[in-house]
Image (tube, coloured by chain):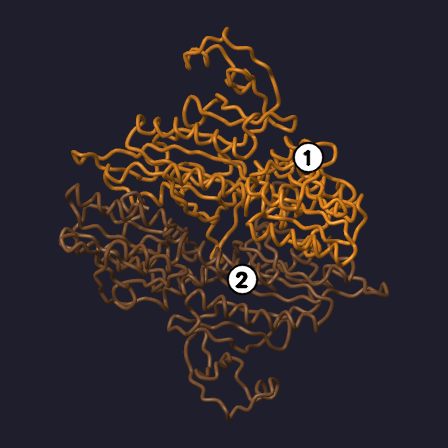
Chain colours: A orange, B brown
Amino acid sequence: MRQSQLFTKIKKEVPSGEVAKNAQLLLQAGFIHKEMAGVYSFLPLGLRVIENIKQIIRKELNAAGCQEMCMTALQSKAIWEKTNRWSDDVVDNWFKTTLKNGTELGLAFTHEESIAQIMSNYVHSYKDLPFFAYQFQTKFRNELRAKSGIMRGREFLMKDLYSFHTDKKAHDEFYEKMKEVYMEIFRTLGLGDNTYLTMSSGEPFSKYSFEFQTISEAGEDTILFDKEKKVAINKDDFSDQIFIDFGLNKDEYNFEEAKSIEIGDIYSLGTKYSEALNLTYADAEGKNHPVFMGSYGIGISRVMGTIVEVCNDKNGMIWPEEVAPFAVHLVSLCVEDSDVAKVDALYQKLVDAGVSVLYDDRDLRPGQKFAESDIIGIPHRVIMSKKTMQDNSVEYIDRKAGNTEFLTADDVVRLTASWQSS
Amino acid sequence: MRQSQLFTKIKKEVPSGEVAKNAQLLLQAGFIHKEMAGVYSFLPLGLRVIENIKQIIRKELNAAGCQEMCMTALQSKAIWEKTNRWSDDVVDNWFKTTLKNGTELGLAFTHEESIAQIMSNYVHSYKDLPFFAYQFQTKFRNELRAKSGIMRGREFLMKDLYSFHTDKKAHDEFYEKMKEVYMEIFRTLGLGDNTYLTMSSGEPFSKYSFEFQTISEAGEDTILFDKEKKVAINKDDFSDQIFIDFGLNKDEYNFEEAKSIEIGDIYSLGTKYSEALNLTYADAEGKNHPVFMGSYGIGISRVMGTIVEVCNDKNGMIWPEEVAPFAVHLVSLCVEDSDVAKVDALYQKLVDAGVSVLYDDRDLRPGQKFAESDIIGIPHRVIMSKKTMQDNSVEYIDRKAGNTEFLTADDVVRLTASWQSS
């Protein structure tokens, strides 16, 4: 799209009142708008990143046989009382509201109860199992403090997947598969190098669970990790017992300690929810059993914040290709109509080739254009000016590496074929 | 996808406790799940329809130069007090909640205040105008009664677009253009024949506005419409004055009266919100003016309900091709492995060709398969059985017309190229 049409603008200064780097950069670049602490709107550039993240996850989950659905925010007291999670004494981050007739409702902070309730309509026999259902959905959590930008929100976007099995064995097979699927997702999201499958407490559902922790100074967690062996343990749960339980020899590892961000987690839920909500199946002999469930979460807006925390330099953000709001930032320094026509032509060629392009067609000083382009952080920058045109070339800058090349316009069209298309 | 994998199942009976046809059929077919009155989850088939509706609208709005964003549900009291819409005495359908520290919050029933507030950060000069921003977003409305299925929800999905202009003249040009864009959207959604651009009161923002009313017995509105001249007026606002104001001669029209569903509306907001929220721009002389705004809504879940109300027969739903959850329902009546392999092969061919196919590979009686296929309402049905295979053919049924043809498998692959791909 033409940048002159984009309603957001880049602020000269990092906004005050934000301590988190992710919120500072995203606000400055006009990706998000702060409604209140922990509550952010997504503006056009930010929403494009969110949609890219969702699409990467959707593709992997669908390939793994998962089915997409979407549950509601408004929740009935009745189903949450069945698991003893309605009371504010038990769950301390409910937002509650009321219907006109005085009926209390909750705003979902998670969806185990809702999905178990829904599935009790559809699961009757062992033949109905297994299956896996997920959603991208807004969660509401009444956090006492919200200072981590879009990484710990009061209203935030999450992908939650739930799996339904006849027994623990069937569950464990899928759970192991999901470890791989999740790591593949985080690799595609550009976080593979810094993200560790991390052993952790499974409370309140099981003895252990796994978290996906991305190393970052902005993290609220701390992990001990072996870089080479790719083994990590949440510091809170580091003990001799955990090595015994997982059959590992502690002496074989060289652990480093680092702050980290939990961008995903996978839990065995066992039969806690299915028993409470009467989600049962009849086996081949007609005998009833509770369904064995698993839960697999990824914080979508948190992933976006984590990418910003991990991928930036002193000049601004550096989006990985797969999630970048646009693949190419085409920056025109041309003024004369005949030159501008040539930039327009390259823009159109790229659009026709299916490449997502932000075209900076604004009448501004080159210095401001470059500084703003750095802040936005689109991975591939193509600059056209009177000077480059005299050489019949364009200037190409890789935002991450920072190196400059001079290419022909046709080279650019060819190169972009290997970049993200929209 | 293989229907044996789909976790939802079709119920034999229409569920009790629903008076609205749309909810009855959608619940029976497993497209939605009722959490409580006016609050429905979207299950895989239903979500596919919702996503198709969104994609049709997104495409048209992007082509018209609109920019997608996404605002929050949680709302600060402060900005709604500025327009005097915070008080429950003024707005009677707020859901309210509170932060831990006691601060009152609202759940957005609409977003004029939020968007005016956001845009006040980005609009400074007349050069920043016009622009147009929209979202697909969940609205919360604390309706006293909710008996219309997914057509009047307490939690529902809406597309709301807002336009920002220097003055009324610029606004009116865009407003006229949007009338055309909206009618094109409703035509693509399969509602074109039954939907009328309807003159209506513009209260509280302006004297008149326009609604898009779809004729249906399930409607809560009544319109007077001239079928040939495609002119319609909301019965509540029918008066001699409206003809005078629009420069029309009442005697030239043959009005019929019918119940109708309001699936969209377009409002001139004037400067009501921009004045209250300090959304102003400086003209070429540096003088400040409030921005002139317009608002353009489409109820996404309501459109889905309306399509069900308009497109059904005694056997079930009949989805228009463009929004159908799948383009093709491939129904196998084969049992022997060698026959099943042939159905599998056609399924794979269609998937490879980019056609969205629901493949009924379940081991059920043909009668039940056909009855369920009618209820789901996928527009194109392809049946393969031992009998059709002996003739080297497949049976094709058009769900709407009901006619049957015998085709070769290759014919089907060719035909589907003109049907919806996913």
Q: In the orientation shown, which residue stands out farthest toward the bottom?
A: B251
Q: Nearer the viewer, residue A227 or B216?
A: A227
Q: What residue would you read off at disc 1?
A: A20
Judge from the rendering whether residue A179 lies leftward or rightward of residue B110; answer left or right. Answer: left
| Vertical side of A165 occupied by A356: above or below | below
Residue A244 seen in the current view? yes
Q: Return the mark for residue A104.
A: none
* Residue B240 sits in quarter: bottom right
Q: What residue would you read off at disc 2?
A: B60
Crowding around mark 1 (Cα neighbors within 10 Å: few <14, some 14 to 19, many 20+) is some
The amino acid on which the numbered mark 1 sits, given as a three-letter code, is Ala
Judge from the rendering whether residue B271 lies leftward or rightward of residue A230; answer left or right. Answer: right
Measuring from the top left, give residue A361's x and y in whole percent. 72, 53
Which numbered disc, 2 or 1, marks the residue closer to the eye?
Answer: 2
Measuring from the top left, give residue A290's x and y in whole percent. 29, 34
Q: Secondary structure at mark 1?
A: loop
Measuring from the top left, give residue A70's x and y in whole percent. 44, 48
| Vertical side of A80 occupied by A250: above or below | above
Judge from the rendering whether residue B10 lies leftward or rightward of residue A379; answer left or right. Answer: left
Q: Nearer the viewer, residue B60 or B145?
A: B60
Same chain for labels 2 and 1? Say yes or no.
Answer: no
* Residue A162 sits in quarter: top left
Q: In the orientation shown, which residue stands out farthest toward the right?
A: B285
Residue B118 seen in the current view? no
The amino acid on which the numbered mark 2 sits, given as a three-letter code, is Glu
Measuring from the top left, give residue A171's x and y in whole percent. 34, 29
Q: Chain of mark 2?
A: B
> Mark 2 and mark 1: span between their CA atoms?
37 Å
Q: Chain of mark 1?
A: A
Q: Secondary structure at mark 2?
A: helix
